[in-house]
Every structure is written in structure tokens, then in C-alpha cells.
Image: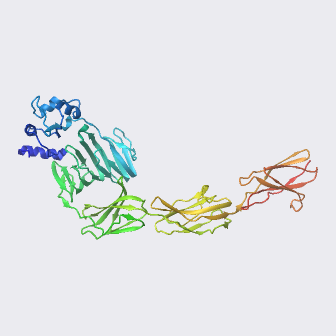
Amino acid sequence: MLKRSSNVSSILRRTVTATLVAWAPLALHPTLVQAAEANLTQPGDTSSVWTYSVRPGDTLGSIAQTYLDSRRSWHQLLHYNRLQSGSELQVGSVLRIPVDWLKQQPASAHVQQTQGTVRVRRARQSQFQPLKEGQTLEIGDEIQTGQGSVSIRFADGSTLQLNENSSLIFNTLTRYGNSGMVDTRTRLLNGSLSTEVKRQQQGDRYEIATPSAIAAVRGTQFRLTADANSTRAEVTEGTVHLQANNRTIPLAAGYGINISGTKMGTPVALLPAPAPDKVPSKITQLPWTLDWQPVPGAEHYIAELYQQPAGTNAQTLRLGRASWTFDQLTNGQYQLVLRAVDAKGFQGMDFKADLEIDIRAKPAQPIIPADQENFEESQPLFRWKLQQAGDLSRLEIARDPEFEQLVSQTAFTPSTQALPAQPLTPGRYFWRVTTLAGGNNMAQSPVREVRIHGDMPKTKIIAINYFQDRVKLFWNSLEETNEFIVQIASDPQFNDILREERVSQPYVSIQLPEKIRYYARVKGVADEFFHSEFSDGREIQLP
């Protein structure tokens, strides 16, 4: 073990708090041990230091080329470690390298998943814009959440969940060359977050600042809530070093603390995790209720569901009693998180469980209309029965029993009746009900036929032309048909029909005797589902 003076100990404490430097248990070369102690005791030397264990084939030149930036050389490495020029490096010995000598490059963070309203303002820009899954985040970017949340993954594999109504700025996102070290520093302006920090190597840095405190960690899980004047921290795994008002304390797992202005409160023991009797690995029917024994001292409970593998928050609830009912969840893998909240607002230790939602839809049973039922209305009521609670359903109507010519489809709702999404023209249709369960599993009911009857629009003779011994009649065309019946009568009541003709165009040319008055009318004809009427009669007479 290295011997440290009181000054050295003080320096080391400040170094661990600010930068989380850890000394790995390596086989140190005596010369390097003496150099390390000498350098650490130099007045004012509080810079972050990374230690490198010498490997076979290493030279100062090769180490400098691999790890140092272009402003530094192997000569500086030699002098910093107080080595004799020309001395050989022994395998397993340790070189001390200031972190700010190492090569540096950006280490972007990545957006794993967003939910609801999430916006980002890029560095040196004034406007916020929507933040989307898969985008990268750089130094200086600021995220704001409204009624939404975002899951972020950093270069070292650590993750951060920013909750609703929160703001976060990325102060530092740096990778130190081939050393594997990462420097990640963010600032929570307001709101709340939870983070899971991967177990870090020596020299790594992970800090979250708030307006009133700094939280520095080395592999842990904790939650932060902050506004302009206060910070609340809750540690569920590992240790967080909290710094405020020139004071630093380690906060261990199972404890929380409030920092208000310049005053750091006393650590408070968090409530134990709720203990449900049993959580099944797979849920095959919703709704489903999880119960547990009330936690002594709990004012209420926070329940969260995270979709896997992305870890995105799918649901957050504030529960007033020791019970949680699940409904309308999408099939998939989830992590369930449950914790108690005490009277001071501290959220307790987490109960966590993995579960799978696997709900299968069941076919609905059609009720009305009956198969091949006839209707004189364009939007008859359709009704059906669901076989499983929690299923959603929609009405589908098509012109063919294979439903390739879909003409009407409603949205998925819990209702078991619906009108067609738009009026149906006369004709033969087929209908069914599609049920939806678990957000992505569907089933279809048996198919029924329905027949809609209606009136064809009335035709109207719009022009009459005479040429020599012929009269030509014109009328409006109809979308429903291209066949028409034309009648010529001697009386306006059309009791004495002299001629009837079926044509496939909206006009006809008829030869008539001169100077005799006749009457003409026309109607469209279609299939059995249309009722049609003749147009008003028009008088015709050759000059």
C-alpha cells in the first residue's frame, strides 16, 4: 500500500470527489512508487491522473504515441514519472499520466427512445426542435421534456432516464483516446432523472450537477430531483459523492438527502422496497392486478413500467394504495419498478421484476345484422359481442368476402357497436369485426353478408334537338349506371306508351311523324339494389 502524508490524504480526497480517480491493485515498480509519491506531494498538484500498467514490448515512445495528444512527448512522460533516461520499463510497473495529457475526442450520447413531448436545443442555436429516437447529442445541447420522457445512452454504456417537465444540459462528453476513459458531465436545471452508471475504470468521470449540488459516481444507480433552489438525491445502489457549499459527503445505497440552497441536510434512510407475493413471468390476460403488503411509513407508491430492451418509460403512476392494475398494454418484455414514498417525499428502494405481456385476441361474435339481411338505409347499426375483457375491436366492411376491396373501417375502441365510417351506396357488402389485444395481436370474427337498398338519382332531360324527321334527346349521366330506359307516349300521363327503348348512353335519336305531339321520359336502371324513377315527361313535336 502507498504511504500517504496527511497532505497527500487531503489531496486524494479532493481528487476522488472531483474526478473519481481510483488506484487499481497493480504490481508497482519501486522506482515508480517513489516517483508517484513524490509527484502527489508536490504543492498544488490536484490534477486527475491515470495510471498505466506496463505491458510486454512497451516503450515510452510507443505509450506516448498511443495515448498522448500531439502537444505531449515521451520526454515529458519520462520526467513526470522521474525515470532515468534510457532505463527499461519493467512489465507490471505503473506509469502515471495526467488525464489532460491524453488524446481527447468527442463521445456523443445517443437517444435510445422518446415518449411524448421531448425537444432539443443544439449548441449555439436559439430554437428548440423535436428530439427523435436514434439522434446523437453533443456538448452544449439542451433537452427539455414536457409531458414526455427520454432514455439516453452514453459512450461508456451508462444510461439516463429524463422524466417529464425536466431540463438537462450536456456539459462534457469526452473520450480519452485508447485509454478507455470517458468524461461525462451533465447539468440538471430542473425536474427529475434516474440513472444507471456502469462500473467505471480508473480515471472515468460521471457527474450530474444541479443548481445547488454536484453528484459524482463510480458505478451506481440513483435518482435526482432539482429546481433552482434545491436538490434531492436518492441512492439505490453504490455510492454517490455529493458536493455542495464546499462540502462533500458520500451518500450510500439506501439513503437520500435534501440540499436546500447552501444547506446540506442529514441523510435519511429510504423506505424498503415493496414486496409483492408473486409476479408471474408472463401475463396472458388483462386487466391484471398486482397487490403487496403496505410499507410502514409510506404515504403513497410510485409504479413504473419500462419497455425492454430500450428501457423506455412506458407508464408511470402514483398509487394511493398497495395495488396496481395493468390494462391496455402492448405485448412485449417489460421491467416493473415499484417503490414507496415517505411523508417527506423521499422515494424508497426499488422492487424490480421482469415480466412479459402476451395477450392473444379472441374472435368477436357478430350479432346484427343477420347474414344476408336487407336494409333500406345507408348506415345501419352493427353490433357484436367480445369474448375477452380488455379487447379492442373495429368494424370492417368490404365489397368482397376476402376483404381486398375495403370500403369502410372504424378505429379500434372498447365499444361493441358501430355505424359504418361513411354511408354505403346500394349493393352487396361483407362485414366482420377485428379484435385487438396486447397492442399487436388480432383476430377476425366470422364474415356476414349485408345488402343495402336505395334510390337511384332521378334523371332529367336536359336538351331536345330536332333535325329533319328525327328528334334527339339528351339527359344527365349517372354514376350508378350506364343503362337507361326511354319511353315515348301519346299522353302526358304515359298511359298510352307507343315506344320503349333501352340504351347504354345518355342520349337517343328517334324518328317521329311531323306535327304530332308526343311525350318523352327516361330513367336509369341498375341491379336489384337500386330503385329508380322516370324523369318528368317532356313534350316533343317535329315542326
Query: Does 93 sit left or right of 215 as displayed?
Result: left
Q: In this view, does 460 lie above or below 42?
A: below
- Residue 250 in view (yes/no): yes
Res. 97 image quadrant: top left
The residue drawn where x is 58% and y is 65% is 446
Query: Does 293 sit left or right of 74 as displayed?
Result: right
- Display coloring: rainbow
- Total label count? 0
The residue drawn where x is 83% and y is 49% is 508
Q: Is residue 140 above or below residue 344?
A: above
Q: Where residue 495 sits in the image (x, y, percent)?
A: 88, 62
Nearest the eye: 220 or 521: 220
Res. 172 image quadrant: top left
Q: Is residue 508 above or below residue 534?
A: above
Q: Where residue 460 sits in the image (x, y, percent)?
A: 78, 54
Q: Residue furthest front?
A: 56
Q: Where residue 499 sits in the image (x, y, percent)?
A: 88, 56
Nearest the eye: 250 or 495: 250
- Residue 474 in view (yes/no): no
Res. 46 image quadrant: top left
Q: Where residue 502 sits in the image (x, y, percent)?
A: 82, 54
